[in-house]
Amino acid sequence: MGSSGHSESTDRHASPVHLSRCGILVVDALTHAILQANPDARALLTNDSSANPKNWLDSFHPEDRERLLSHIEKISSGHSDHETLTCRQASAPGDLLTRLEMMPLNHRGTKPTSLLVCLQDAKPSGNQENPSPSEWALLSRFVSESPATLAMLDRDMNYLAVSERWLSDHQLEGKSLVGKSHYDTFPNLPEKWKEEHQRALQGESIHMEDEPLLRKSGKIKWLHRDIRPWRTAANEIGGILIFSEDVTAKKNAEDALQYSEFRYRGVIEAASDGFVMANMQGSVLASNHAYARLSGYSEDELMKMQVAELEAHEGRNEILRRMRQIMKQGHACFETVHRRKDGTTFPVEISASFVPSMGGVVFAFIRDITDRKFAEVQIASYVRKIEKFTEDTLKAVSTMVEHRDPYTAGHERRVGILSADIARELGFSEKRCNDLKLVSHVHDIGKIGIPSEILTKPGKLTPLEYQMVQTHVEKGYEILKDVQFTMPIAEIIYQHHERMNGSGYPRRLKGDEILQEARILAVSDVVESMMSHRPYRPAHGQEKALQEIEENAGLLYDPDVVAACLNLFRVKGYSASNLN
């Protein structure tokens, strides 16, 4: 380093601590603010040993201040571990010179967080080779009150001073170490560390990170260590300074995170489903091999993409809105469509979870459901064929019944139409309405077992004949009881002549004992029958039929079903023509 008219040195083996009258500062490496100062430092800078200067750099001549800042920057940036220079004081630039020695403290990675600055009058008087008792007291006090884990030892590795942090970090609270051997205090020190002490006593400065120390309990303690020589006023090495920082908690956390990441990466890569991690801005942060194969992109390409570029249907705003919902709910599962690198699309099922760490990210497991979607289409087609076959079969059976009783031809079909329309009024799904319509088509299937001469008799039936006709519901139940359908077809047919007050047949069920579909079928059957011609009577007409169910609502018929039927005819203009 150049001199610029004043004595400077860059001897990297020199130490900032001299056992003479010495001002000592600990300053922030970034802001240069004073963190700690001894009385001699305050006296040299302000002529008042009880007051800290507002800005200690202002105590020096402006021309020297630029050089001082450049030396500080070298240490703060990690490019130097020791700087020495002499500066003129601003108050008397021609008469007062101050020698400054600086070294880094409290490393975080490659850069220090604070600096140790030693100040000395460049024109000392008298013999300063050995410190006075008061100077020893000041130096000991500085070391003991230092916020760092700091120990000062002589050439025989006996303690001269230690900080309170040194005692607490090494579980030595309440013990006096001054005059005791470092090696007696720590008998299990690695030989490597002892060799480093000897190298420092020869003038070398040593910095080590993540050094393990086996404690008496058998547990490992991890340390960052700085070992530097200190020199007497005669520039002879008087011993070493040891700065250490216990980073066990940090190291354990890093190891746990590394292990967790290892397990996470192993699980993710072993997964057969695709995986994408994205931040809340929609940028892809990570992916796995499985998704790279699905999408046709490499993992490096995916790392440069937005989730919106993978989506085939949703835009960026929709995706970000969905991600905010996932953050709020914690988890979501949904289906969407992704686009491959070649432009083709494929359906996916995504199971996504919000992870608060790393600034908030979304983990998404992505499954290609192309085969499932194809199977669903095939199954739906098969179901439609089965339903069509069932419908055609029931219609064929209905036609067969009508051939047995030509006077009631079309009755079951018309009852089916009216039943489905009443069900819609009650809020049934379209599928349920259509199924009820099919059931209604065969509600009189049991009449197959009734003699045709009774079914077609033009006059009034005898009591015995009427009892025979009533058995058609039981016969219908027996015919259809083993048929698998979307609703209990046999039981509905069995109940369609039951009444709300228990006066119906064949089991005299009442109220909620009767299925809702059977209650609808009962009203539809009565209304259509009264509106139609029979061989033994003329048609009663629409109004007479409506009057019948209105007067007996709640007594014979379900009042809700009656209300829905009346609403169709009287409010919506429904008529017999709707049943053809």
Image (cartoon, helix red, strand yellow):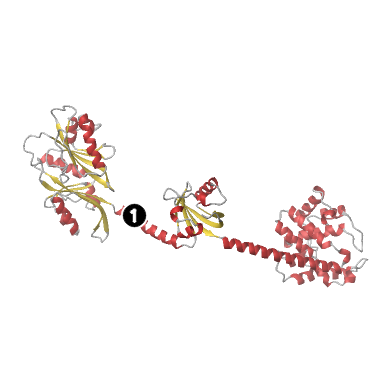
Which residue of the protein is positioned furthest toward the right in this rendering? Answer: 459
Secondary structure beneath dot 1 equals helix
Image coords of residue 240 (percent x, y): 15, 49
Which residue in the rendered view is the most extreme toward the left? 127
Q: Residue at x 61, y 62 (%)?
A: 374
Q: Is residue 171 left or right of residue 376?
A: left
Side (left or right) of 402 relative to 218: right
Choose between 456 and 317: the one closer to the eye: 317
Give the residue displayed 62% in from the left and 62% down from the top: 376
Q: Position of residue 62 (x, y in %)?
A: 22, 29
Q: Quadrant of the N terminus?
A: top left
Mark 1 — residue?
254
Amino acid type, residue under disc 1 in the picture: Glu
Q: Give above or below for 237 relative to 521.
A: above
User: Residue 400: x, y in percent?
Assistant: 83, 69
Residue 124 visible, this angle? yes
Could you say which quadrant of the image residue 74 lies in?
Answer: top left
Quadrant placement of the C terminus: bottom right
Most distant residue in the front direction? 342
Q: Residue at x 55, y 57 (%)?
A: 348
In the picture shown, does residue 88 fall above or below 210?
above
- Whether residue 500 is visible to the viewer of this picture, yes or no, is no
Vertical order, 274 against 120 (above or below): below
Q: Give residue 380's quadrant in the image.
A: bottom right
Observer-nearest of 556 and 54: 54
Instruction: Please give the count of numbered marks on the rendered protein.
Output: 1
- Tag 1: Cα neighbours inside 10 Å, few (<14), some, or many (≥20)? few
Residue 521 versus residue 239 in the image, above or below: below
Q: Position of residue 96 (x, y in %)?
A: 14, 30
